[in-house]
Amino acid sequence: MQQSIDYTQYSRQPTTNLNHIPGDKGLPVLGHTLEFLRDNHALVNRGYAKYGLVYRRRVLFQNGISLLGPDANQQVLLDSEQCFSNYLAWNTVLERIFPNGLMLKDFSDHRYHRRILQSAFKKPAIESYLQPMGQHIKEGVSHWPRNQTMPFLPAIKSLLLDIAAQTFLGVHLGDDAEAVNKAFVDAADASIAIIQRRIPGTRWARGMAGRELLETFMRRQLPNKKVSDDLDFFAQICRAQDEHGQQLDDQAVIDHIIFLLFAAHDTTTSTLCSVAYALAKNPQWQEELRAEYAALGERIPSYDEISAMEKTGWVFREALRMYPPLPVIPRRCLRETDVLGHRIPRNAGVALSPLFTHYMNDYWDKPKQFDPERFSTARAEHKRHSYQFVPFGGGAHKCLGLNFAEIQVKLFLSLFLSKCELSVAPDYQPKHTLIPLRMPTDGLPVTVQNRR
């Protein structure tokens, strides 16, 4: 399926003709970039207080328009008139490191590839991953230090990479583990490189080398995967067919699996860091969840048992509300349109803010408070507007791995909290980077103790 949009008619830089939109330019050259990187939530709140739900800003050397609130989320994410491009929003960041990933596709091309990839995320496939994932979690957590401060981020990142190698690739990394891990981290880090030139020693050069190593590794596995009966993502994508029996070519399979590995691994890492921090600050909820797991004993739960973990689902969603992995969702306008009464010109960059929406007093009761019960059936605060809770986006581009992410987080929590307690220093407040995803910059120091 070929993309029908002629992207060459659009500049790599969004239009700068935004003077009719309220707002300001910020600092010379840098604009609002420093504020964006330091405290994006505060920046957006200041913009809203001064200009309202629609205003212009300059971030990361690009002019653009902030579109705030659930009504803007709905119009842009649902995109019933096909005005907003994912490809143009992400191509300058991801195209050379993660070419042809699902986020770099629009409309019919996106639908075609998404339908093929969906088979790897259906219930029978996910059920087949649970036992090996559970064993990896048990084994990995058993080696974490007890009764001393440890950085949670690198520990969970390493554990999830091992799980991803099993569930996504169906391979044991063995002697390749260190090289593949480094290649993956370097490729992900390159997505935020300001200078995209292959100068030795730079973030971009390391990222491109990492991408090449990952591609070589995947291509080496490809012949066996194409003829295997394995149930991992890699094998299933190799075998997946469209309605006409057509399969993806080798390069498309490699491009998709590398991007899915990045998207699924890093978003789950971000989410579990947020969940761990929230539970460490609110230990009463650790006890609530343990009660939910009591009947399991030491057994790895089934898919249906995980799906039935109601309170764990509340905690998962509340952590995503307060700390969404993707605080900003960008798009580029393909043609002039109107949003919330403002004319959005062709080729304008626009940005939604899940973080802002998730703290709006109009839709959430005491939004600064960690309160998982807001997602209970009795309260259902998240249903006051269909686009007020958007940690995984919405519309056609809503995260393909949403259900898998929830299952994986619930599986981890059920096995971890049944044996361990998690705490942080009483006055601890994490610092985060927000680009490309929310991650604690201090590694998230926690203390793990065996349950008494």
Image (tube, grey):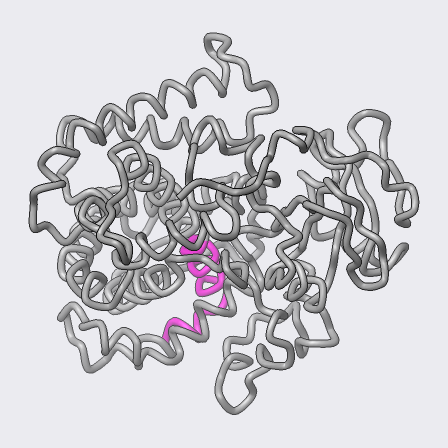
Return the x and y of residue 427 as percentages of the image width and height: 58, 55
Task: Please tell me which residue is depicted at 81% across the width and 63% down the height of the picture.
Answer: 340
Q: Is residue 11 left or right of residue 51?
A: left
Specify the quadrant of the image occupied by residue 212. Answer: top left
Specify the quadrant of the image occupied by residue 421. Answer: bottom left
Say whether residue 283 is magenta.
yes
Q: Nearer the viewer, residue 47 or 393?
A: 393
Task: Please tell me which residue is depicted at 36% across the width and 59% down the height of the picture.
Answer: 405
Q: Quadrant of the N terminus?
A: top left
Q: Is residue 33 left or right of residue 268?
A: right
Return the x and y of residue 191 as percentages of the image width and height: 51, 31
Return the x and y of residue 98 as percentages of the image width and height: 42, 33
Q: Nearer the viewer, residue 283 or 435?
A: 435
Q: Nearer the viewer, residue 319 or 382?
A: 382
Vertical comparison of 448 with 98: above or below: below
* Residue 34 appears in view: no
Task: Please tell me which residue is depicted at 76% across the width and 43% down the height of the picture.
Answer: 346
Vertical comparison of 179 with 72: above or below: above
Q: Is residue 166 left or right of residue 396?
A: left
Task: Please tell me which residue is depicted at 60% across the width and 52% down the height of the picture.
Answer: 327
Say whether residue 219 is magenta.
no
Residue at the bottom extreme of this rendering: 378
Q: Which residues make up the magenta segment?
A: 271-287
